Amino acid sequence: MTVTADHTVMAEPRPCERCSKVSLLWVVGRCADCIAELGLQDDRTEYDAWKADVQAEYGRK
Ligand SMILES: [Zn+2]
């Protein structure tokens, strides 16, 4: 049986860089809750910083 590693899926509990909550679902250090918050807040600074990290990690699409 061959197991294919999918590097975009991180199913490993890790603390969020932003809120320190341990989460199973996170992208480049931010948990899903934080990413939702980043996308909703008026100040785009944090969201843009997160997006830049995503592009650095996974490349431009
Ligand atoms: Zn968080």
Image (cartoon, rainbow, N blue to C red):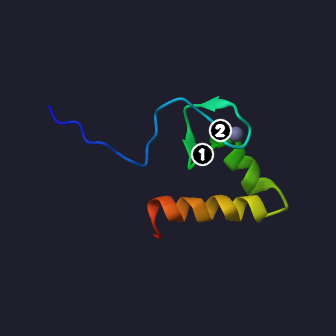
Q: Amino acid at mark 1?
A: Gly
Q: Position of residue 14 (x, y in %)?
A: 56, 32
Q: Quadrant of residue 20?
A: top right
Q: Is residue 30 left or right of residue 39?
A: left
Image mark count = 2
Sort mark 1 into few (<14), some (14-19) or many (20+) by Cα contacts within 10 Å: some
Amino acid at the residue labelled 2? Cys
Give percent across and percent down for residue 40.
Answer: 78, 54
Query: Considering only vertical position in the picture, is 40 above or below 48?
Result: above
Q: CB atoms at circles 1 and 2 under 8 Å apart?
A: yes
- Looking at the rendered structure, the secondary structure element under dot 1 is loop
Q: Residue furthest left?
A: 1
- In this view, the residue in front, 32 or 7, is 7
Other residues around mark 2 within 10 Å, as few (<14) / some (14–19) / many (≥20): many
The reply to whether the residue tagged 1 has its Cβ within 8 angstroms of ligand 1 is: no
Query: Where does the N terminus fall, quadrant-wise?
Result: top left
| Residue with the mark numbered 1 | 29
Whether the residue under disc 2 has CB within 8 Å of ligand 1 = yes
Relative horizontal placement of residue 12, taking residue 39 as reference (left or right): left
Q: Position of residue 16 (x, y in %)?
A: 65, 38
Q: Residue at x 51, y 64 (%)?
A: 56
Up/down of 38 relative to 18, above or below: below
Q: Residue at x 68, y 62 (%)?
A: 49
**Can you name the residue that lies furthest to the bottom here?**
60
SS under mark 2:
loop
N-term mark: 1 or 2: 2
- Taking the image in four quarters, ligand 1 sits in the one at top right
Marks 1 and 2 sit apart, C-alpha to C-alpha, by 6 Å
What numbered label is drawn on residue 16?
2
